[in-house]
Amino acid sequence: MAIWLTENSKIIVQGMTGGEGTKHTRRMLASGARVVGGVNARKAGTVHEGLPVFGTVAEAMRETGADVSVVFVPPAFTKDAVKEAIDAEIPLCVVITEGVPVHDTTEFWAYAVAKGNKTRIIGPNCPGIASPGASNAGIIPADITTAGRIGLVSKSGTLTYQLMYELRDFGFSTAVGIGGDPVIGTTHIDALEAFQADPGTDAIVMIGEIGGDAEERAAAYIEKHVTKPVVAYVAGFTAPEGKTMGHAGAIVSGSAGTAQAKKEALEKVGVRVGKTPSETARLMREIMSSR
């Protein structure tokens, strides 16, 4: 099985007619994902990549039965695009765009809450979500792994790809890239909860990084609610204090947000933490081989 994205998911692409939207629509289609249309108000009524282009998300949902939207629009227009998806009550909105102002993300996240949380937001600044062998919504390469019984949730797109590749012999139920911005929609805890409830997931890989306290909060959640084995990696052990590393949210401030503190919090609740991505994969391989 999988979480949030299955072989029955119908995907629309907001910004499909742009350069990135076009490229990744092609890749999603090639992977077997059911992409059913795009959204661009200025090109409504046209056909792009063999797919219909609609004026609004609501129209696209009405005409195609879409239940997933992938957002490939410039940062300045992302807030409005996501709020449109929320207004249409699409169940899942995957925001790939990097560089979205934190204020805008905060606003559309709060807007989703005010609307009753009928739309799950993944991202922004994320690679998306992939359920190997079933569907792919975003930019995760479809050919780097196989279907299996490991769940993965990660702040880092690149490390998502690496762990998926290194554990390709076991495969994944679903891999979720949640993004590394200071404010994001879906969190580690959301994914942990879903993987814990998913009968098709036997074990979980969690990738975090310096900055904030998301990993510490995830550790507290794991201690109380997760019975499946969890292996983790925290990027940024050598990051200097006060310098943003890669992601906007990856910054150590004083004693807060360090990789060592996150590692200790996770290990305290029984999570095995690798010192490198490859060691993390080895730890998960040991768990899966023993089952």
Image: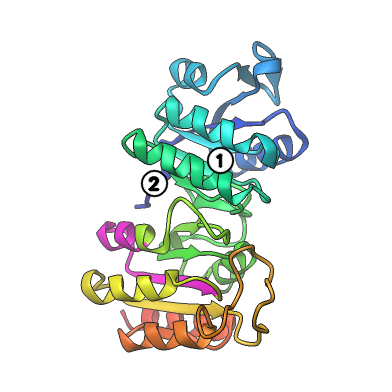
Residue 177 image position (x, y, % from top left): 53, 58
Q: In the picture shown, does residue 195 fall above or below 78?
A: below
Instruction: Report the span colored magenta.
Output: 192-209
Q: Residue at x 64, y 47 (%)?
A: 100
77 or 70: nearer the viewer: 77
Residue 207 image position (x, y, % from top left): 50, 71
Give yes or no for residue 199 being in the magenta stretch. Answer: yes
Q: Which residue is mark 1?
A: 32
- Would residue 47 be found to the left or right of residue 109 on screen? right
Q: Amino acid at mark 2?
A: Trp
Dividing the picture into quadrants, the one containing residue 206 is: bottom left
Residue found at the very far top of the displayed protein: 45
Mark 2, Cα crowd under 10 Å, few <14 / some 14-19 / many 20+, is some
Residue 179 image position (x, y, % from top left): 56, 58
Q: How is the image coloured?
A: rainbow
Dot 2: element: loop
> Does residue 281 appear in the picture of this structure?
no
Q: Earlier in the sequence, mark 1 or mark 2?
A: 2
Residue 215 image position (x, y, % from top left): 43, 73
Q: Residue at x 35, y 36 (%)?
A: 114
Q: Residue at x 56, y 83 (%)?
A: 254
Dividing the picture into quadrants, the one containing residue 157 is: bottom right
Q: Which residue is mark 2?
A: 4
Q: In the picture shown, does residue 45 fall above or below 75?
A: above
